[in-house]
Amino acid sequence: MIVIGLTGGIGSGKTTVGRMFQDLGVPVYNSDVRAKELMNSSKKIQKELIALFGEKVFKDKELNRAFIAEKVFKDKNLLEQLNAIVHPKVRKDFLKWSKDQTFAYVIQETALLFENNSQKLYDEVILVTAPKELRIERVLQRDQITRKEILSRMNNQLEDKVKVKLADYIIENIDLDQTRQNVLDLHKRILAKYC
């Protein structure tokens, strides 16, 4: 099974690009969505989160994402501890999921791929980029957070100029029609290379 990593900074549009690959029939595993599901459903993860953050980590038996975000984006050490709890479980879940796929390749969408130095886990990596102000605009429209909070999250991610050197493919996501064409072209390239 060929495994392609899909990554990009907050607001770059990696989930949009992931959906475009899905439209072409490619199985896409969204690590962020799955991590949230696992944090809400796994008793083991819940115990570890409560040990790390206290009881406030859950509100009405649901993950209190705002509380977690407020804590971890101010404290890099706490963020690393959270990642150490969640990432191995997501990795295990992804490997189980990928065994059930029959397409020529699968994509794992993951925000902190390079930050976690996990590029070696993938056959190739696609990086989605967009200008910083456009990314901020997108997140302001999408999430109920402030510009300051967005910049705080961006500061926990490597800059695109660093990631560009590490990625195998770059998709600049400014114009959706152009992005869709780039996804189609890249899909054909990957199929031609591995099939």
Image (cartoon, rainbow, N blue to C red):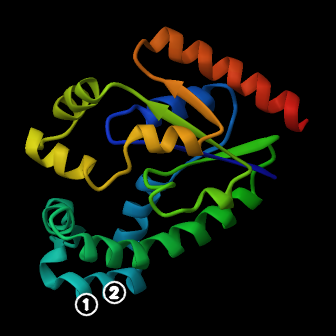
- Amino acid bearing label 1: Ala
Q: Residue at x 58, y 46 (%)?
A: 166
Q: Position of residue 130 (x, y in %)?
A: 38, 26
- Amino acid bearing label 2: Glu
Q: Position of residue 43 (x, y in %)?
A: 39, 84
Q: Residue at x 71, y 57 (%)?
A: 98
In three-dimensional space, the C-alpha distance between marks 2 and 1, rounded to whole angstroms, equals: 5 Å
Q: Quadrant of the C terminus?
A: top right
Mark 1, residues whose alpha carbon is within 10 Å: few (<14), some, or many (≥20)? few
Q: Residue at x 33, y 25 (%)?
A: 131
Residue indicated by mark 2: 48
Q: Position of residue 79 (x, y in %)?
A: 29, 70
SS class, disc 2: helix
For residue 75, which numbered disc appears in the image?
none
- Kindly give the residue lying farthest to the right in the view shown: 195
Residue indicated by mark 1: 51
Within the image, what quadrant is residue 167 found in? top right
Within the image, what quadrant is residue 176 found in? top left
